Amino acid sequence: MPARRYHLWLGCLAGPFLVVLAVTGVLLAVDALRAHATQPAAAPAGLSVADLAAGLARHGTLERLAVTPMGTIVAQFATPRRRATIDPADLSLRPVAEAGDTIRTVTEIHRTLMTGDPGRLILALATFAGLLLAATGLARIWRGERGGGALRRLHRSLGLTFALPFVVSAATGLGLAAAAMFPVDGVRPAFPSAFAEGDRLPVGAVAALAAVAVGDLEELVLPRADDADDGYFLATADRFAWIDPVSGRVAAASERPVMHRLTAAILRLHAGRSMTALAIIFGLAAAAVALLGLTGLAAGGIAIRRRRPVVSGAAAKADTIILVGSQGGTTWGFAERLAARLTEAGHRVDLAAMNSLASDYPTAERLIVLTATHGVGEPPGSADRFLARLPQAILPPAFAVLGFGDREAKAFCGFAEAVDAALLATGAKPMLPLARIHRRSEPDYAAWVERLLAALGHAREAVAPTDRPVPAPLVRGSLTRRVVSGKAMGSRWSVTLWAPEHRDLSDLVAGLAARIAAIETSMSRFRDDSEVSAFDRAPCDAWQSVSRDLAEVLAVGLDIGRRSGGAFDVGLAAEVAARGFGAGWSGSGVARDRIVPAHETIELDLGARRIRKRAAVSLDLAGIAKGWAVDELSRLVAEAGFPSHLVALDGELRAGAVQPDGRPWAIGLEAPAIGRRAVIGHIDLIERSVATSGNNRRCDANGGHTIDPATGRSVAAAPASVSVLGSTCIVADAWATALMVRGRDGLAAARAAGVEALFVAREPLAMPPTARAARWLGAQLSNHRRCRDAQP
């Protein structure tokens, strides 16, 4: 079940009880602040129980001393009969601040709902559910959920701001509930059979009391004057004791459980009475919990209401079907406006949620999908069953998909990409390439609507596309498939594009070559003047300004290093060279005995474009730089006016828009072995990238090519190859390397990270024992698996 469903159900079940706890908690926090304002100062460090009792003798016959968990000293006198709070600074008496009926009632509600242990158990379960709510809520934020209107933004802001104090308050509350239902006070010692004979010592001369600091005292009961066989009863944080009033020594004692002392500390922390600041923080956190409940319920109610379509027609008679995937209701607004525009243009429109996909649309000519993305590539609430139902549906022959999302999210319009790919797989033809709207951009939406109307024969005026400023697709008859190429990073780049036959591409080629040269200047280890070589020479802890290229590449590399658990590492130049793969480099440093991951060694200030290292490390960007170069070349080609193109650089590819005839770019997947050119499958790309990592070239004596950061040695037990698909080639490039490093665990790692990947496994053929250095040559295809959970 997705995190958002857990969050919803937990909120519905535990919400009312959490609101009760929150409101009563606010009232108790206010009372704690009042108590702080009137409470005497803490007892001096050197004040003993004997000195305290002796000093109070001037006020009357002392009967009992007690120290509350909040540190207040309360004395009870036999004559004159009274109770008083003690100021330990001068041993003066103050009236006892008794809790009023209201506070006692609020306290009982907060602890037990005024029903005893059953209510305490209910509130404990609700508190535990609150901790799960905090965990699922933070998980949704961490996974990239954004947007959703003012209520949802307020809900997330409150949750982030007060998550820590809430967790502390909830955890300590659970501890107190457990201690109340399963007491941990300990067992008092039996009353001594006899005390020493003689006159009683003055209380100030009792040695056992003089050895106890007031700060450790919980209770002292003095012997009754009219009972010669009575003694002192002492309770401290760690023991009970009976004290002989004649000798002044301990007559009987028993240790108290460690959990008792822990419970006392938890009570002081939970109640916020040990520090004024804690009372304020916990009071604000309690108020935030109440607001979180109200905003969560309100936002959920709005979302449910908005999931109902406003515009609807008869699907059996419609020529245009609009399906909507929405989480908070915003996408419905765009869909309703689109339905109105198409109706004005003379179309018969049916508008429905994506989960309402029908089994057949007998008169429909086209399907239009407008969908948001929830979390990291997950479907929104009104579309979470769409992909499962799609294979059984008979769809219209043409479609268009418009995605809504946030470019800063981890998977920008990831679900829209999945829907677009699924519709392509059914054989339907795209009317327009997949388009993406950033943060409900009205200009981008208007531009897409105009292009859709133009595709339907209702063109008004030329409008720039959503993602890139390129012209509308041209008719294939006026275009020719062209290929340009050049040198790059010890290999060659190529760009396949559709352009007029006589179009001069020399300026484009020059621009692409210049961009490659700039990237090599930044990241090449073959150049002594490159930025990575300069970083090798830079002292530790010294900031070094870098180019946008290097800053952006390191940002992705360090992030995937963390997300992959260190399987991808940009700091392995010395280890790579030590395995014989660094021939011709200008330098590489010394291989380390213990490899510290780059994401723990290198600090990046992306905004200021500067980096520094905390320990010696040498950069090797071979596993990510080519992906970045492919993305940059694709961007330049699109900006030059060629939306339909395919960029390739040594196994890394990125496709632009569909080809003029509506076909995607088909990429062949070859068997990764020397001497074999067999194609074992195809990948269709539209506005997506694919990067492949394999062990079929430049292997060392261990039979591998990819270096494992954990060992500094090549990975011999890796798959034959891993191909990763993603919205950007740089991310796909890095994950392909990381999954190769994970070896047999790569498939599980891809699923856990939400990476879409193709694995080709291998089994070595039988070879002579002396052929260890070349045993990889005997690799054969044994399995071909596809993991398609989400895009990276």
Image (tube, rainbow, N blue to C red):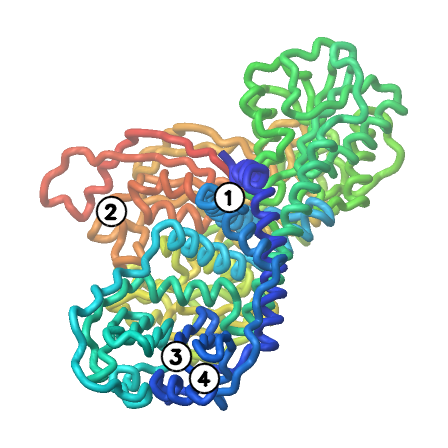
Under tag 1, what secondary structure? Answer: loop
Disc 2 marks which amino acid?
A: Ala
Q: What residue does disc 1 label?
A: 115
Left or right placement of residue 83 versus residue 159 in this view:
left
Marks 2/3 in contact by CB < 8 Å: the verdict is no
Q: What residue does disc 3 label?
A: 215
Q: CA distance from mark 2 to mark 3?
A: 64 Å
Query: In this rendering, is residue 597 above or below 371?
Result: below
Disc 4 marks which amino acid?
A: Gly
Disc 3 marks which amino acid?
A: Gly
Residue shown at the point (30%, 51%) measured from the top left: 705
Q: CA distance from mark 3 to mark 1?
A: 34 Å
Q: Position of residue 199 (x, y in %)?
A: 23, 86
Left or right placement of residue 278 versus residue 592 in this view:
right
Under tag 4, what secondary structure? Answer: loop
Q: Residues within 10 Å of mark 2 (few under 14, many from 20)?
A: many
Q: CA distance from mark 4 to mark 1?
A: 41 Å
Q: Position of residue 456 (x, y in %)?
A: 80, 24
